[in-house]
Image (cartoon, rainbow, N blue to C red):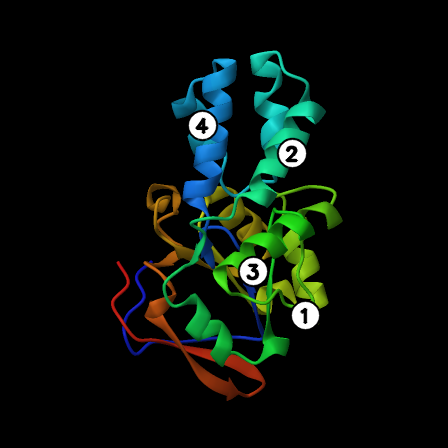
Amino acid sequence: MRLEPGQAIEAQALLFDMDGTLIDSRVVVEKIWKRWCDEVGLDWHVVLPRLHGVRMYDSIKEFAPMAGQDVDAVYERLYREEVEDVEGIVPIPGALALLAALPPERWTIVTSADTVLAKARLGAAGIVPPPRMVTGEVVTLGKPDPEAYLLGAARMGAPASDCLVFEDAKAGIDAGLAAGARVIAIAGEHSFEVPGDVARIADLTALRFDGIHADKVRLQVVKPCN
């Protein structure tokens, strides 16, 4: 679905995914995972499309057995490398400006990363973690299950149906939709995964905070969104 300049979007609360939505960590994540794939003989081109948007442990549970590797040992190694290596992590264009403009009680982050990893990456990108952030270790089922977004809505004191979810990967988009929220896709590297009926923007420079109207956050579309 195309968003047009001048269009207003309103919601009681905004729920942002982290990787690919607020920050660009792709270089770091893909470097670490490709190195491991090369070491254990997994086809990187098979692994890559199934990495983004899901919890790290869930990815490792899928791929470590394929390489004859112990799941917990692989997780311990790759997790440590991802926490320690934040060089090259940057905010998505428009993220810092939009978050700075938003009332802090009206938005939070819902990420598949755990708290330690999320704080490391957000800090590298210059984003202060919001107090009601939902991280991967506090849910039983990761994305694409809707549990994380339902918890995010509950923490914001809003029904999921009156929340606006920002996502970039299919697993997260599916999770937001399954929770009953409206979804805006950051259509970057994963634009081919975005369903045709989901609104999409190139990055967060497309939106401007336009105040609180009738107790709802209003965002204004300020540039064409293909």
Residue 156 is marked as 1
Neighbourhood count class around disc 1 (C-alpha, 10 Å): few under 14, some 14–19, many 20 upward: many
- In front of the other: label 4 or label 2? 4
- In front of the other: label 1 or label 3? 3
Distance CA(mark 4)–CA(mark 2): 16 Å
For this rendering, which residue is in front, 113 or 4? Answer: 113
Neighbourhood count class around disc 2 (C-alpha, 10 Å): few under 14, some 14–19, many 20 upward: many
Horizontal and vertical percent for residue 205? 34, 69
Distance CA(mark 2)–CA(mark 1): 27 Å
Horizontal and vertical percent for residue 165? 52, 61
Distance CA(mark 3)–CA(mark 2): 22 Å
Q: Which residue is mark 2?
A: 57
Neighbourhood count class around disc 3 (C-alpha, 10 Å): few under 14, some 14–19, many 20 upward: some
Amino acid type shown at disc 1: Met
Horizontal and vertical percent for residue 147? 68, 50
Distance CA(mark 1)–CA(mark 3): 22 Å
Q: Earlier in the sequence, mark 3 or mark 2?
A: 2
The secondary structure type at the circle numbered 4 is helix
Residue 184 is marked as none
Q: Is residue 52 above or below residue 126?
A: above
Amino acid type shown at disc 3: Gly
Left or right: 167 with respect to 7?
right
Q: Which residue is mark 4?
A: 34
- In front of the other: label 2 or label 1? 2
Judge whether residue 161 can be spotted in this image: yes
Q: Which residue is mark 3?
A: 123
Q: Is residue 188 above or below residue 141?
A: below
